[in-house]
């Protein structure tokens, strides 16, 4: 009796070396895909950095190119007179108003940031931080309207008191303005405008303080304020400087709020309460540009070049100050 063997479908076994080749191919494909993504991201990042430099160079070239006619023309042809005599009072007013605003805004911003990060309950801190962030979204023209219609009249009693009792100080001397539209009022408006920027940045810096530093300070018997003074503020000093310079840059370039609030004049004066106040470069450009023509436009653009240089110098100075503290690290 013969037996038949039924042949079923044969299954071909893949040799081990073939399996290894497949894994290597998959690994190579994955590596190539990862390398392509890395190359794309690197190219995008590099291109973005180069684009920033190109934009900065283009702005500088635009300002320099249109400023040359005003800088080289005969003084008798310039509608605003000799250039440096024209621009220096405005440059002084720009720096003066921004400095006053920063002087008022920085301590308040640091205090608010410390309250949010180390004192306030969690729910209150979240809500307050949200309100501070919303304040940065208010348009400058709204601040200008608030300054001229609400703040300026309410500042008059304070101006009178300062002039009466502190008039022997040059800052508070002179005839008090009857409208309240002074450089001090403009500085207060600028301080309110830069407050959310400085506060938000300082808050994030303070929250990044190493927890071990804070706990070590408290473990040694320090109070909360002593812990902040020993651990939080030293760690956050570079961030505070960066935030202050960013706020200062906003104050230096602010236009509409200053143009609406300030009672301007073409002079250099440190008096804060009088009706004759040094104007800023940005506000003067906004007020004079619609009626300017010919070399007058070039003079205004040249004053914009001066503002560009001032802002650039301020930021470079801030970077130099921060670089001096680059050896500080949260891990030290």
Image (tube, rainbow, N blue to C red):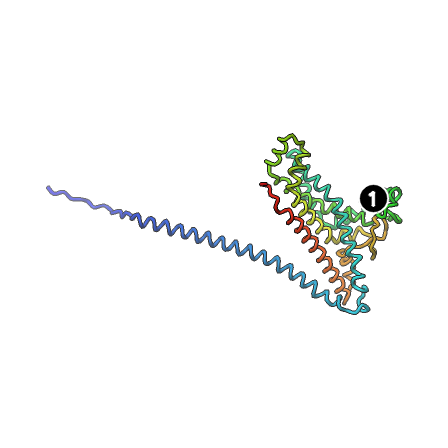
Residue 116 placement: quadrant: top right
Q: Nearer the viewer, residue 148 or 37?
A: 37
Instruction: Return the residue at label 1.
Output: 155
Residue 284 placement: quadrant: bottom right
Residue 29 placed where, x, y %?
41, 52
* Figure check: 290 above or below 236: below
Q: Is residue 197 left or right of residue 158?
A: left
* Figure check: 13 above or below 287: above
Q: Helix or strand or loop: what does disc 1 sit on? A: helix
**Which residue does the image show at 68% across and 34% down from the upper left?**
226
**Which residue does the image show at 80% across and 57% down from the upper left?**
89
Q: Quadrant of the C terminus?
A: top right
**Which residue does the image show at 14% across and 42% down from the upper left?**
3
Residue 322 placed where, x, y %?
65, 48
Q: Nearer the viewer, residue 310 or 319?
A: 319
**Which residue does the image show at 67% across and 61% down from the upper left?**
60
Residue 177 placed where, x, y %?
87, 49
Q: Quadrant of the N terminus?
A: top left
Q: How many marks?
A: 1
* Figure check: 209 above or below 82: above
For label 1, the crowd category at 10 Å Cα-Cα, with few meaning under 14, some 14 to 19 and many 20 or more, is some
Residue 261 placed where, x, y %?
80, 50
Give the farthest residue toward the left: 1
Residue 73 placement: quadrant: bottom right
């Amino acid at each position: 009796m013969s037996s038949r063997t039924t042949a079923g479908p044969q299954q071909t076994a893949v040799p081990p070396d073939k399996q290894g080749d497949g894994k290597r191919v998959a690994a190579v494909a994955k590596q190539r895909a990862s390398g392509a993504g890395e190359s794309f991201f690197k190219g995008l990042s590099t291109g973005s950095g180069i684009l920033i430099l190109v934009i900065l160079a283009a702005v500088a070239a635009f300002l320099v190119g249109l400023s040359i006619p005003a800088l080289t023309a005969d003084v008798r042809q310039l509608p605003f007179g000799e250039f440096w005599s024209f621009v220096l009072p405005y440059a002084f007013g720009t720096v003066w108003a921004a400095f006053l605003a920063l002087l008022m805004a920085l301590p308040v911003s640091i205090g608010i940031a410390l309250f949010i990060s180390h004192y306030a309950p969690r729910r209150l801190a979240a809500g307050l931080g949200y309100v501070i962030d919303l304040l940065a979204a208010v348009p400058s023209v709204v601040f200008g309207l608030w300054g001229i219609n609400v703040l300026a009249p309410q500042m008059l009693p304070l101006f009178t008191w300062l002039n009466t009792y502190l008039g022997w100080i040059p800052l508070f001397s002179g005839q008090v303005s009857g409208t309240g539209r002074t450089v001090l009022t403009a500085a207060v408006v600028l301080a309110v405008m830069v407050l959310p920027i400085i506060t938000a940045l300082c808050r994030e810096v303070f929250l990044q303080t190493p927890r071990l530093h804070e706990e070590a300070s408290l473990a040694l018997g320090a109070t909360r304020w002593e812990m902040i003074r020993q651990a939080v503020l030293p760690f956050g000093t570079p961030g505070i400087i960066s935030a202050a310079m960013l706020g200062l840059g906003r104050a230096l370039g602010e236009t509409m709020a200053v143009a609406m609030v300030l009672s301007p004049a073409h002079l250099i004066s440190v008096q804060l309460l009088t009706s004759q106040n040094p104007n800023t470069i940005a506000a003067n450009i906004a007020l004079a540009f619609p009626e300017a023509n010919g070399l007058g436009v070039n003079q205004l653009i040249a004053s914009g070049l001066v503002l560009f240089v001032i802002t650039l110098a301020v930021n470079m100075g801030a970077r130099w100050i921060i670089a001096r503290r680059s050896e500080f690290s949260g891990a030290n």
